[in-house]
Image: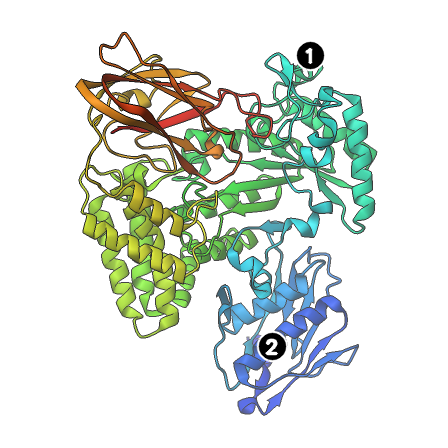
Amino acid sequence: MNRLLVSIAAGVMCLAGFAQTTLIGDGGKRHGRILVNDSSSYEAGVLMQDFLTRMSGREMPLVSGDAKPRKGDVVIRRSQDAAVKEDGFHLTTAPGYLLIEGGEGSGSLYGAITVLERYLGCNYWGENEYTVPVKREVKLPYINVVENPAFRYRQSQNYALATDPMYRKWMRLEEPKDEFAGGLWVHTFDKLLPSAVYGEKHPEYYAYFGGKRHPGKASQWCLSNEEVFETVAQRIDSIFKANPGKNMISVSQNDGNYTNCTCPECKATDDYEGALSGSVIRFLNKLADRFPDKQFSTLAYLYTMHPPKHVKPRKNVNIMLCDIDCYREVPLDGNESGRDFLKALHGWSAISDNIFVWDYGINFDGTSTPFPNFHIIQPNIQTFRDNNVKMHFSQIAGFRGGDMSELRTWMVSKLMWNPDADADSLMRTFVEGYYGPAAPYIYKYLQLQEGALLGSRTPLWIYDSPVTHKDGMLNPVLRKKYNELFDKAERAVAGDSTLLSRVQRSRLSLQYSELEIARTEPEKDVADLSAKLDTFETRSVRYGLATVNERNNSPVDYCHLYRERYLPKPNANIAAGAKVEFSEPLRAPYDKIGDRALTDGLFGGATYKDSWIGWEGMDVSMVIDLGEVKTVNSIDADFLHQLGAWILLPKAVTYSVSEDGVNYSAPMRNDLAEDSSPQVKFVNVKQTLPQPTRARYIKVEVEGTKQCPHWHYGVGNPCWFFMDEVTVL
């Protein structure tokens, strides 16, 4: 027993020798060196030197070469340990100095960042927004840890990635240009086989459906065509030769759904495979065989989401699986849309260990709309990790001034590295570090909003509107509470301009939501709305909010349009409240509002989810009954241009008028030019009559575009037109 106690005491004394490693001591007067021996370790050494200098005011010298380490040094070198994987690292202070041994890729850099963040209290929050504690002495506890990322490739979005090089490094994020040759990353069919070059001469290269070929910028390929394969293979060969060092390329369908080829050969393949991905995988396997030393990434997206039954992807075929159709209020196993994706994920993971998951944590139609999905990020990432996923893109938009952009990227980056980290602790760490004394109120706001979303049982969609949630997580009582929390947050940091700007920037999404909901209400407080518009516009400009949706509609334009379109005006519309009869029945849900939507005085918004009524793939006429004969000077109708939802302007709008509903005036036709711009627009089609005319009935005939054109990613499929207020003066 005595010998055992002596042995334990000796061990404790030995560990005590390693209890702390002093890098900078005696108030900064004594310090070690930073030893590096290659370009990777040099980058990590420069970063360590920079932050340690900021921390202590004392610069540790950076020494290149093979100098012998001394006590108190920082030694950074390439790891020779097989347990250290790509981007991973081994940290230890056991030799009496800090040893950072990095794996392939950026392991040394990430090891240095981990030391600064985990053991020395540094952190990076956003664009040039970081915390560096001031220390007279810099000491480390005993460290001996090997750490590897859960995914070998981790990608997300944030405005700071383009403006602050350190931000990307600290978040441990990668970009497609790091991996993919020639910048070819997703939706590459037209880049590899340009329709502008081949479309006219070789329509047989392109998808056959609806009784004809569809050559065009957004078209898919006829994957059974041997000439397509050989032409693409030659193009790929030249791209790899022009990009030495890059071994991966994306050969993936153009954006759009159900635009695949259904020629007899392609259809036979897909029918046999039981999935529309069958012909894609067979094509990719041929490329993988032609170039066995290269990696080929292809999309499993929309119509190709589910795997084939028989053919298996080659080892060098990367499956980029996308969960675009899933709702986001619960984890993937919590609703039908998520379970369908999981069925696809399990199917792919059974036949491939080379999977890239593209996950969506973004509201494309409202980047400034609250999107409380923080509670599902971790379980979903864990699911990906557990199903052979090696590469992960978490698409969250990350626009400046978008909904919690800084927090969202920070949490995603941490969980992509370690899916088992404590998510709530991560959120608290960020909120406390980023908002300071305002943190308790911001944290409560986030928790309250999450609970309200779950309690409402309203789906959270990636093409959502605040209006969807006006009776749920954005109901009047909750909005009042949210504003009270933000008022307290602003007061808590009123004396700190930096922290106040962060709080006010984070409040923009709530202010945008209030404006969006208010425009749908029949009764409006014009003075209150005008003040809110002024505040939102002023702060949007001050804090650099560039867009309110993925279509690049600016908040300044939004506010100007709001004042013109949504604020009440003296109602001179003689069609207000008039009855409308349609030549074609309205589909649900538009049938519920069709009898009043065109004459109720409420103009629709950018997401087509309120006030609008729409028709798909057809022409429509309608008659508006003014109730009695009145003098008509002009007629106009309101139309939506929203390409992302396959909503195109009609080809023409024709007006005519009648006193008796039988005999109509000569038709007055208005032709509309084709518009391929991505911005959401409201287009007013106005017709001034040649002279004031007495009439009771107004006929509006709409010639729809009916089919998506070759440049649209719904090429060959039916498109919609959406219509709102008809104004008669």
The image position of residue 52, as x and y in percent, is 58, 79
The image position of residue 81, as x and y in percent, is 73, 60
Q: How is the rendered protein coloured?
A: rainbow
The image position of residue 75, as x and y in percent, is 69, 75
Disc sitting over residue 264 in the figure: 1
Dot 2, crowdedness within 10 Å: few (<14), some or many (≥20)? some
SS class, disc 2: helix
Residue 397 vs 344, above or below: the answer is below
Q: Quadrant of residue 98?
A: bottom right
- Left or right, 724 with respect to 282, comes to left
Dot 1, crowdedness within 10 Å: few (<14), some or many (≥20)? few
- Residue under the image location 67 percent in, 39 percent down: 354
SS class, disc 1: helix
- Left or right, 308 with respect to 618, comes to right
Q: Which part of the image, by quadrant, shows the C terminus?
A: top left
**Is residue 422 in sight in this rendering?**
no
Q: Which part of the image, by quadrant, shows the N terminus?
A: bottom right
Of the two numbered discs 1 and 2 on the same chain, state the one appearing first in sequence. Answer: 2
- Residue under the image location 81 percent in, 50 percent down: 244
The image position of residue 349, as x and y in percent, is 61, 34
Q: What's the amino acid at mark 2?
A: Asp
Camera-side residue of 509 and 442: 509
Camera-side residue of 288 and 135: 288
Camera-nearest label, 1 or 2: 1
Residue 535 vs 239, above or below: the answer is below
Camera-side residue of 369 and 593: 593
* Cα gap from disc 1 to disc 2, whole angstroms: 64 Å
- Left or right, 677 with respect to 653, comes to right
Give the residue at mark 2. 50
